[in-house]
Amino acid sequence: MSKKRRQERRVLTRLKRIGLQLCRSIEEGSFPELYIPSRSTTNIVYDARLRQYVLGKKKIRRSSRVVTHLRPLTQLLWIAQIAKQLIREGKSSTLRDIYYLSMAEEGVDFKSQRESDKTIADLEALLGAAREDFHIFPEERSAIFGDLTIEYTVPGYEGRQLNLTIHPDGVMIGPALATAEFVDTSAERVIAVEKGAMFTRFVEERVHERFRALIVHTAGQPPRATRLLLRRLNQELGLPVYIFTDADPWGMHIAMVIISGSAQSAHIPGLAVPDAQWCGVWASDIERYELPSERLTARDLKRVDELKRDPRYQRNPWKRELQVFTRKKRKTELEAFSRHGLTFIVDQYLPERLGL
Amino acid sequence: MSKKRRQERRVLTRLKRIGLQLCRSIEEGSFPELYIPSRSTTNIVYDARLRQYVLGKKKIRRSSRVVTHLRPLTQLLWIAQIAKQLIREGKSSTLRDIYYLSMAEEGVDFKSQRESDKTIADLEALLGAAREDFHIFPEERSAIFGDLTIEYTVPGYEGRQLNLTIHPDGVMIGPALATAEFVDTSAERVIAVEKGAMFTRFVEERVHERFRALIVHTAGQPPRATRLLLRRLNQELGLPVYIFTDADPWGMHIAMVIISGSAQSAHIPGLAVPDAQWCGVWASDIERYELPSERLTARDLKRVDELKRDPRYQRNPWKRELQVFTRKKRKTELEAFSRHGLTFIVDQYLPERLGL
C-alpha cells in the first residue's frame, strides 16, 4: 500500500472513530461532545526535541449540550463528512472550494471563508493530519527538477512512473506529485531555492548533474505540500536539504519555516525538516562577495527585531546574520550574484557554500 | 530549422544590421544614431484590422551627437550586446538579472531596475521582437495539460519529445516549453483558466478527454510566454481558445489582454490572440446560475468605469457585462460554482458555455 493510501486509511479510521463515539453518546442518551487540541497561541510551544512548533496539552470542549457550541460542532462535523467524501471519491479541492461547497448545505452557514478555514484547521488538529491528507490543497504551485523517479498514486495515473528530469522548466508540485511514491534517485542532496529565476539558472547550468542534486523551487514561502515533500526527501531518502533565499528578514524566515515549521501549522505533525540547512544568501555575503545591496526599510528592520526575540534565532548562522542586518542595514537577493556574471552563483558560490 | 531558431536568427540578423549601421557612421566620420519606435502613450493605437494594440509611426532619435542621448544610447547598445550573448550561449535570464549584470560593467550605470527594464523594452521596439526571443524571461510560471506532444529546442533537450498528459499537476510553461515545437495533438480546443484550483479540477474531471481540450492555467494575468503559447496553439494548430476568468473587472480584463494585447506590450508584434473567446464567468451568470456573490468595492467600480471608456469594450459580451456590473454591483469567481457541487462547473457550465 502506498504511503498516501496508508495516511488516507488512517484519516478515514479516525473519522469513523469520531463518528462512532458521537453515535454512541446519542444511543446512550447523553449529549455528544468532542475535545479538540487548542490552536490558541498560549498552547503553541517550540519542541526542542522535535525541533519544531507543536501544540501543548490544552484541549477545547465542543458539546452539543451548550447552545453556543452547537454551531461550531455542526460545522466541524460537516467538514469531517466532506473530508471523508473527498478521500472516497479521490477528488481534490481548495479552502475556497470548501467555503462555496458549504453554501449548498442547509444549516451549515459559515459567515466567511475565514470561519470555514478555521474549522478545517480544527479538523486537522482533531485528526493530527494535514488538510492535504483529506485532499484540500493550496492554490500556489512550486516545482522540482532532477534525477528522481516517482510513481503516482492518483486515480488514472496509479503505478505510472515519471523521472523528474523529464521537463527542464521543472515538474509542478501539485496534488499528484505531493502524493507520489519515491522509486529511485541518484541524487545526493536537495537544493531548495526561493526564486524561479534561480531555479531555471540551476537547471540550465546542470546543477542537478554537477552537484548530484534535486532542485526545488519554493516560490517564496513554500506551500505545505512542498514542505512535506522536502521532509520526505530528507527522511525517506536520507538526502541533506540546503536552502537558499534572499538576504532579508523575510528570506531567512522562509528557510526557518521549512526547518522548524510555523506557529500557524503547529497543530500538524510532520511538516518540519529540522535537519535542513540555511546556506544563504547571508547578510554577511554582501561584503564577502561584493554584492550590490539595498537599504533595509523600516518594515524590514522591525521584522529583524521581531526575529531577534524568537527562540529559534538564538544560534548561528541565524543570530550572527541578524546582527549583521542590524549593523549594516543592507539586504540583497539571489539574483545579485549576476553582478559577477550569470554563472558565478553556480560556479563559485554554490560549491563554496556546500563545501564541495 | 525550428521556429525558435528562426526567430533567434532573425533577432541576430537585426542586431548585426544595427551594429553595422553604427560602425559605418563612425567610419564615415559622422555621429552614429538610431531611430527607435516611440512607446509613449500618444503613439499607442488600437489596430482594428490586427485587433490588437500596436505602435504608431512616431520614432525617437538617439544620436551620439547629443550629449543627453549618449547615456541611453550606450545603455541600449549594451543590452543589445547582452541579447546577442544570451542567444549565442543559449542561456536564459530575467529582467532582474540584467539589472545586476549591468553592475559588472564599467560605464553602464542604470539608476534602477526601472531604467534597465525600460531599455530592454526599447530594444524590443527596435527589433520588433519580444524579450523572450533574446532569452529574458519572467519570474512567474503558468502550466498546461492535455494531449499535445512537443519537441524541445533548448540545449540538452533538443529533439526530445514530451506529451503534455505526462504529469497531472500540469506541465510548467517556462523557457523550455515556451520555445518547443508542436508535433502532434488530438485536441480540438484550448481552455484557459485563471485559477490553479480550477485547472486541477479540470484535469481531475478529465476535461481534456471529455471536451478534447488542452487546459492552460494562466495564473492570473498570464506571463507573455503563456500568451505567446496560446497564440501559437490558435494559429499553428488552428485550435479555438476559450478563456474562463473570475467575474470581476480584473478577471474580464485578463481575458481582454489575452485577446487584444496590452498597451504595455504594444511594441511587440504577435502576442495577441484576437480569435480567442471570453466565455465567463460573466456578471450575468451570478443570476443565471444562482452563484454566491460579493459587492463590488469602490475600487472595482472605478475600474468598471475605466473599462467602459475603452474602445475594445464597446461590443458584447463585454459591453453587456459591464452594464450588469454597474446595475447589480456584484462580483463572483470560478470556485463559486462549487456551491452546486465540485463537478457542476465541468458537468453543466462548461458544455453549456462551449455550446457542446
Image: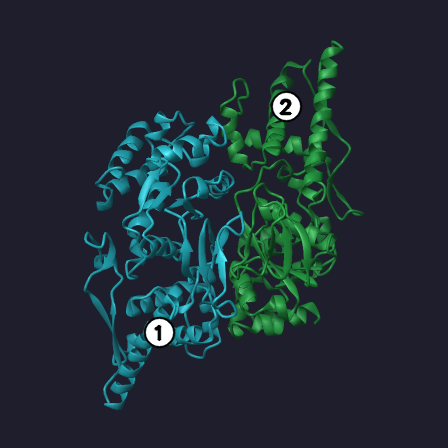
Chain colours: A cyan, B green
| Pick the front one: A107 or B240 | B240
Tag 1 secondary structure: helix
Q: Amino acid at mark 1?
A: Arg
Q: Position of residue A6 (x, y in %)?
A: 35, 70
Q: Position of residue B227 (x, y in %)?
A: 64, 49
Number of labels in the image equals 2
Q: Is residue A252 left or right of residue B71?
A: left
> Which of the 4 image quadrants contains residue B79?
top right
Would you place residue B174 above or below residue A329 in this image?
Answer: below
Per the image, the residue denoted by label 2 is B77
Between disc 1 and disc 2, the foreground one is 1
Q: Position of residue B258 (x, y in %)?
A: 66, 51
Q: Is residue B128 left or right of residue A299?
A: right
| Pick the front one: B35 or A201 | A201
- Position of the N terminus of chain B, as image quadrant, is top right
The residue that appears at 68% across and 39% down in the rendered structure is B5
Per the image, the residue denoted by label 1 is A9
Q: Amino acid at mark 2?
A: Leu
